[in-house]
Image (cartoon, rainbow, N blue to C red):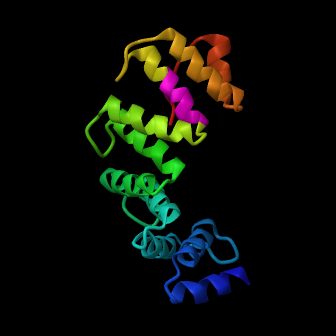
């Protein structure tokens, strides 16, 4: 029922309906899973500056769902979505900069995007900022800030940060 409504609205060019229809195809909700159709609809919505669709395109390019894997496209769509306020895209873009995936490695840019995501409540970004302070990548090594960022993440329920506080072993995870 919802899928039919999304289809009608998507045909009329409504970006939110295109994105919702794409999510239905992507997850097989109320319709048979079809990554190709998901990508087509994400693209239509993304080209209308729908941040969720832009982020989901980055996910598709990262996983190869409906498209060839392409790290440069992951960066492109993550950047667009991040600039449009998508927190998950901010975190994903930070990881691209941190690992040099699809773009030149840049710890300062990684920190910038982790901080933007952390400011909007992304606990993994908080934890990774702590790990940057531990390693000294892009920042001056500062163990006080390590614990400060780990604690922020742990206070919001981030499991890895809780483990790191208990065991003192910082790691970067995507």
Q: Position of residue 19 (x, y in %)?
A: 54, 71
Q: In this view, does 158 lie above or below 143?
A: below
| Residue 24 picture location, percent across and down | 62, 72
Query: What is the count of numbered marks?
Result: 0
Residue 160 visible, this angle: no
Picture coordinates of residue 135, whole percent (x, y): 41, 16
Picture quadrant where residue 112 is located: top left
Residue found at the far front of this picture: 119
Task: Residue lying at the far left in this picture: please name it.
Answer: 104
Predominant SS of the magenta segment: helix
Looking at the rendering, the stretch of residues picked out in magenta corresponds to 123-130
Query: Which residue is depicted at the point 30% across and 33% down?
Result: 106
**Residue at x-position 48% and y-position 70%:** 42
Residue 70 lies in magenta, yes or no? no
Please, is residue 17 above or below residue 141 in the view?
below
Q: Can residue 113 be seen in this view?
A: yes
- In the figure, is residue 150 to the left or right of 49? right
Q: In this view, does 24 lie above or below 8?
A: above
- Considering the image in quadrants, where does the N terminus appear? bottom right
Toward the right, the furthest residue is: 1
Q: Nearer the viewer, residue 159 or 49?
A: 49
Q: Which x, y percent locates residue 91?
A: 48, 42
| In magenta stretch: residue 126 | yes
Who's the residue at 68% across and 29% down the image?
159
């Amino acid at each position: 029922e919802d899928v039919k409504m999304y289809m009608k609205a998507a045909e009329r060019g409504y970006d939110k309906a295109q994105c919702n229809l794409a999510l239905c195809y992507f997850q097989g909700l109320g319709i048979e899973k079809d990554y190709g159709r998901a990508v087509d609809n994400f693209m239509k919505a993304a080209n209308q500056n729908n941040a969720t669709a832009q982020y989901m395109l980055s996910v598709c390019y990262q996983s190869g769902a409906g498209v060839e894997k392409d790290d440069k496209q992951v960066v492109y769509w993550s950047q667009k979505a991040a600039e449009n306020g998508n927190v998950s895209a901010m975190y994903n873009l930070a990881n691209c900069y941190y690992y040099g995936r699809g773009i030149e490695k840049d710890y300062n840019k990684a920190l910038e995007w982790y901080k933007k995501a952390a400011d909007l409540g992304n606990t993994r970004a908080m934890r990774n900022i702590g790990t940057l302070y531990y390693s000294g990548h892009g920042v001056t090594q500062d163990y006080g800030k390590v614990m400060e960022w780990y604690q922020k993440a742990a206070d919001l329920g981030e499991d890895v940060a809780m483990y790191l506080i208990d065991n003192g072993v910082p790691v970067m995870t995507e």
